[in-house]
């Protein structure tokens, strides 16, 4: 009887401990997400005008909603990376938004993206990057979709003039790494200097402190 009571107490103690650890991890992730949201909102308020001494733009596409390994998120994984870069470099940001938003449901989004890839679609972009010509350096961020750039990234690369600019790609994924997309971008933007030492992070890592540290370490390695 006494043994059973002690066993029950130990069981409850372990359960409380597990719940506390999970809630600490969740709190930390939502703090990161809120910080990223503030950084990106703030950069948007600067109306995409470059700083006098910092002509850097971070242009990115990222899908909020249900995603592999991270659950349902308001700020996508690539957007988290974009926020770290914007914050560290004090740069402007431009979010590439589709006219037709992708489904927040992961499986449906997989189908939508698959169809677009099959059709070599060029999905329309809802918003215009203003003053693109004023920037010397453009960081370009995106998730890997079906082993490639999302088709909307082709729309972005083909619709605007990146001649003479320094282009630095970064991406998130869940196993494919960069999937050769840094080379793809280099091959498409023949009149730009494309740095193929981009950064690829797993989406689930991009949301954590480790992801932020990796991103800053990479920026430092590029000389920033
Ligand atoms: C439509 C779709 C296709 C995907 N295809 C791949 C893939 O081929 N390889 C991979 O590693 N991850 C793939 N993923 C996972 C995403 O690349 C990963 O979750 C990424 O971090 C999502 O970034 P985001 O939140 O900025 O959209 C795919 C996700 C979606 C929604």
Image (cartoon, grey):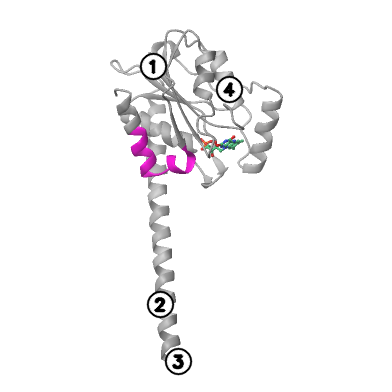
- Which region of the structure is painted magenta? 202-216
Image x and y of residue 110, in percent: 65, 37
Magenta segment's dominant SS is helix
State which mark lies toward you, 2 or 4. 2
Q: Quadrant location of residue 151?
A: top right
Magenta span contains residue 132: no
- Mark 2 vs ligand 1: CB under 8 Å? no
The image quarter in which residue 25 lies: bottom left
Q: Residues within 10 Å of mark 3 (few under 14, many from 20)?
A: few
| CA gap, disc 2 and disc 3 | 14 Å
Q: Is mark 3 on a helix, strand or loop?
A: loop
Q: Quadrant of the C terminus?
A: top left
Do residues under tags 1 and 4 come within 8 Å of each other at their CB atoms?
no
Mark 2 and mark 1 residues within 8 Å of each other at the beta carbon: no
Query: Where is mark 4, residue-wise?
Result: 125
Q: Note whether residue 201 is visible.
A: yes
Q: Disc 4 beta carbon < 8 A from ligand 1?
A: no
Mark 2 vs 3, N-terminal side: 3
Q: Along the polypeptide, which appears first: circle 3 or circle 4?
A: 3
Which residue does the numbered mark 1 point to in the structure image?
137
Q: In which quarter of the image is the N terminus?
A: bottom left
Residue 146: image x %, image y %?
A: 62, 32
- The percent coordinates of residue 70 (x first, y second) are 51, 46
Query: Which residue matches tag 2?
Result: 10
Residue 105 found in image quarter: top right
The numbered mark at residue 122 is: none
* Residues at marks 3 and 4, CA–CA distance in whole angstroms: 68 Å
Does the magenta run of residues contain 210?
Answer: yes
Dot 1 alpha-carbon crowd within 10 angstroms: few under 14, some 14 to 19, many 20 or more: many
In this rendering, the label closer to the viewer, 3 or 4: 3
Q: How far apart are marks 2 and 4 (CA)?
A: 56 Å
Q: Distance between the residues labelled 1 and 4?
A: 21 Å
């Amino acid at each position: 009887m006494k043994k059973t009571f002690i066993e029950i107490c130990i069981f409850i103690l372990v359960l409380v401990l597990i719940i506390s650890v999970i809630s600490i991890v969740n709190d930390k992730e939502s703090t990161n997400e809120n910080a990223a949201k503030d950084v990106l909102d703030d950069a948007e308020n600067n109306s995409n005008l470059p700083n006098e001494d910092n002509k850097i733009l971070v242009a990115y596409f990222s899908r909020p909603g249900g995603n592999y390994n991270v659950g349902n998120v308001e700020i996508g994984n690539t957007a988290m990376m974009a926020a770290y870069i914007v914050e560290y470099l004090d740069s402007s940001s431009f979010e590439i938004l589709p006219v037709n938003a992708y489904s927040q449901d992961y499986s449906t989004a997989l189908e939508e993206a698959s169809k677009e890839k099959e059709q070599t679609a060029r999905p329309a972009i809802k918003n215009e990057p203003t003053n693109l010509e004023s920037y010397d350096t453009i960081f370009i961020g995106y998730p890997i979709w079906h082993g490639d750039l999302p088709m909307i990234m082709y729309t972005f690369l083909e619709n605007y003039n990146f001649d003479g600019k320094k282009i630095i790609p970064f991406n998130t994924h869940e196993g494919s790494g960069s999937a050769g997309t840094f080379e793809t971008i280099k091959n498409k933007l023949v009149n730009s200097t494309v740095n193929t030492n981009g950064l690829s992070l797993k989406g689930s890592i991009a949301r954590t402190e480790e992801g932020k540290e990796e991103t800053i370490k990479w920026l430092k390695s590029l000389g920033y």
